[in-house]
Image (cartoon, rainbow, N blue to C red):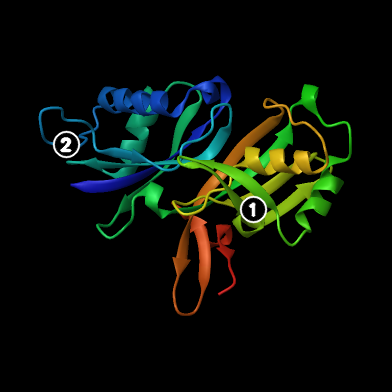
Amino acid sequence: MNKLRLKFSKNGPIKFIGHLDVMRYFQKAIRRAEIDIKYSEGFSPHQIISFAQPLSVGATSDGEYMDITVNSMESAADVMNKLNAVMNEGIKITSVAELSDSDEKAMTAAYAAKYVVRFRDSLKPDFDWINEFKKYLSQEKLPAMKKTKSGEKEINMKEMIYDYSFDEKDDSATFLLAMSSSATLKVALLFGTFFESISKELSPLALDIHRIDIYKLVENESEKYIEPLICNDIESRYYLNA
């Protein structure tokens, strides 16, 4: 058996397909591609696959991940080619890596995610939002109310923003945000709370969100950094304070 991690992109109209439908889409694609996927045991066997953190409906991405277990394969590249041959427009497998038994599942390993955020042309703010956002982020604390299964709780978003930058020419912002089982900050909450702080209303359809990648934490005695769940380039690492 081989454990594999697949990285895929999600762009175009398929961005409006929800996570459960994406799961069903891959289950069918795996059967069409004749991948020798491992099934669970019992009365209702299912493919052994798992995804990293779901992408919000309407958002696009170049860095989505899923883990699968196969009984046999020719090579990781062959799995990628077979799947891409049966994919519909909008989803493409961009990388496949073999995992060891000690590797965590993608969802468990996820530590942060990087996004590029713009406003849709018809819903652009009527003020200098980049300058105002810079002022907002300069505060020592960024309190927000986050919905949980048990109700609402106050969080400090400042602790969940690992890096950010603005591109005034492109009228966009790039954020590296916490995304783990213990702390996750969504783009919509960050922007919504920012708008509230300046007494503005954010339309739920205003943001054009693109996820660049999902990162895992690597920590040892000498250094601490995050890197993509499939890392082929050390330049994509972000080094953190020890």
How far across and how far down the image is residue 23, in percent?
Answer: 36, 29
* Foreground tag (2 vs 1): 1
Q: Amino acid at mark 1?
A: Met
Residues under numbered marks 2 and 1 in contact, where contact means CB atoms less than 8 Å apart: no
Q: Secondary structure at mark 2?
A: loop
Q: Is residue 159 left or right of residue 138?
A: left
The label number, if any, that marks residue 209 in the structure image: none
Count of residue discs = 2
Tag 1 residue: 157
Residue 39 lies, with reference to residue 216, above or below; the image says above
Q: CA distance from mark 2 to mark 1?
A: 39 Å
Q: Nearer the viewer, residue 136 or 152?
A: 152
Q: Secondary structure at mark 1?
A: helix
Residue 96, by quadrant, is: top left
Neighbourhood count class around disc 2 (C-alpha, 10 Å): few under 14, some 14–19, many 20 upward: few
Residue 201, by quadrant, is: top right
How far across and how far down the image is residue 137, in percent?
Answer: 76, 54
How far across and how far down the image is residue 58, in percent?
Answer: 58, 26
User: Residue drawn at (51%, 35%), measured in percent from left and top?
Assistant: 55
Residue most extreme to the bottom: 221
User: Residue drawn at (44%, 21%), measured in percent from left and top?
Assistant: 88
Q: Nearer the viewer, residue 99 or 20?
A: 20
How far across and how far down the image is residue 57, in percent?
Answer: 54, 27
Tag 2 residue: 40
* Quadrant position of the C terminus in the picture: bottom right
Q: Amino acid at mark 2?
A: Ser
User: Residue drawn at (70%, 54%), measured in percent from left and top?
Assistant: 142
